[in-house]
Image (cartoon, rainbow, N blue to C red):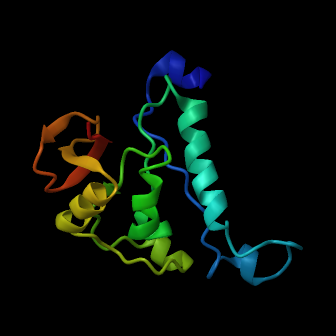
Amino acid sequence: RDLQRTTGGFTEFVPLPFVPHTAPIYLNGKVKGLRPGPTDDEIISVHAASRIVLAGTIDNIQCSWPKVGLGKATELLSVGCNDLGGTLMNESISIAAGAQHGQCASPRELKNAAMNAGRKPHQRNTLYEILSEDASVDLKLEKSH
């Protein structure tokens, strides 16, 4: 937080849950007691705590739908996340780790996820400036009133 207060360089924070399915640290069994990733409750708690801990320093909390799935990402919009991220094209990092939630999501899928969470979708740029209310590429979400 001190670095962010000094530089203002972070546009978002993305808590990335461990996807163990093909990770050597998990597969080789050398770390005793290593679980196969976080529980759903832990994923929710980390995203919610991120919003609280980073309030006033990093305004955008993004959920990684390729790691948690679009359904869980929609739920995370209710516990502190305000960004679903992007449509992505051939996302490979999560897939290589064993995530099973896909490599891309259409703008329509992301828009529907936001609306299902009671949020108003927006297209944004990397600096979180709203480009359009169309939500055709990337989405920054804010509470609907």
The spot of residue 112 in percent (x, y) is 23, 63
Name of the residue lying farthest toward the top: 6
Look at the image and tell me whether residue 64 can be seen. no
Q: Nearer the viewer, residue 121 or 23?
A: 121
Residue 115 is drawn in which quadrant?
A: bottom left
- The residue lying toward the viewer, choosing from 30 and 19, is 19
Indicate the quadrant containing the N terminus: top left, top right, bottom left or bottom right: top right
Q: Position of residue 28 (x, y in %)?
A: 78, 83
The reply, left or right, for residue 78 in relation to residue 139 is: right
Q: Residue furthest front?
A: 145
> In the displayed structure, would residue 23 be above or below residue 74?
below
Residue 141, quarter of the rendered image: top left
Please name the residue shown 49% across and 22% down the image. 56
x%, y% of residue 144?
Answer: 26, 41
| Percent x, y of residue 70 | 39, 68
Q: Quadrant of the C terminus?
A: top left
Instruction: Report the front residue among 134 and 138.
Output: 134
Query: Is residue 101 something one can see in this rendering?
Result: yes
Q: Residue furthest right?
A: 32
Residue at x 65% of width, y 75% of height = 20
The structure residue drawn at horizontal position 61% and vertical position 32%, both measured from the top left corner, is 53
Horizontally, residue 42 falls left or right of residue 80, namely: right
- Residue 101, compared with residue 86, is above or below; it is below
